[in-house]
Every structure is written in structure tokens, then in C-alpha cells.
Image (spheres, rainbow, N blue to C red):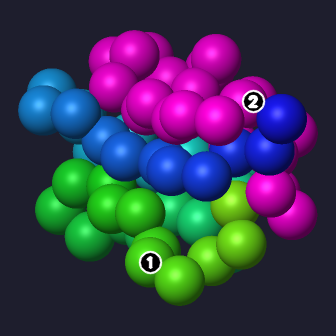
Amino acid sequence: MAIKKVWIEDGCTGCGMCEDSCPAVFLMKDTATVIEGVNYADYEDKIKEAADNCPAEVIKYSE
């Protein structure tokens, strides 16, 4: 199944790893944000990589 929703829970440390992994989906300001309107299915592997490698474990997604 394809990823349909991506979000970031409270606790982001602002390390920027998610934006480095997948700049089409994640944007770093003071903390990470998810870019709306992206077809997340196109970036499924990178989103999962960002979630798996997030040191704060705050990147979540649903299929």
C-alpha cells in the first residue's frame, strides 16, 4: 500500500535529517514540517528512511 499521510509529532529536535533524506516532502524551518500536496507514494522509500532514522522518532506516516 502507498503512503497517503505524513506528519511530525511534537518533539522535533530540528536536526534537518528528514529534509536531507527527502527534501520533496520535508522542510526545515525552526522544526521540520511536511510539505502539503505532495504525492507521498512517489517518495515512499525516502519517507520510510527519514522516519526510521529520525533521532527523535517523531516522523509518522500512514498507508
What's the magenta region?
A: 41-63
Residue 24: image tag: none
> Badge 2: how crowded within 10 Å, few (<14), some, or many (20+)?
some
**Number of numbered tags placed on the structure image:** 2
Residue 9's place in the image compared with 20, above or below, is above
Callout 1 amino acid: Glu
- Please name the residue that numbered disc 1 is placed on: 36
The image position of residue 51, as x and y in percent, is 58, 27
Give the residue type at disc 2: Glu
Q: What residue appears at the point 33 percent right and 25 percent down from the top-left corner?
A: 58
* Mark sitting earlier along the chain (1/2): 1
Given this view, does label 1 or label 2 mark the residue nearer the observer?
A: 1
Cα–Cα gap, marks 1 and 2 = 19 Å
Q: Indicate the position of residue 62 as horizontal and vertical percent values.
A: 54, 34
**Crowding at label 1, few (<14), some or many (≥20) Cα neighbours within 10 Å?**
few
**Residue 11 appears left or right of 32:** left
Disc sitting over residue 49 in the figure:
2
Q: Position of residue 53 (x, y in %)?
A: 62, 20
Q: Secondary structure at mark 1?
A: loop
Is label 2 in a helix, a strand or a loop? helix
For this view, does 11 lie left or right of residue 44? Answer: left
Res 37 visible = yes
- Residue 23 visible in the snapshot: no
Query: Measured from the top left, where is residue 55 in percent x and y?
Result: 44, 17
Q: Is residue 43 magenta?
A: yes
Tell whether 61 sits left or right of 29.
right
Give yes or no for residue 15 being in the magenta stretch.
no
Name the image quarter holding residue 63: top right
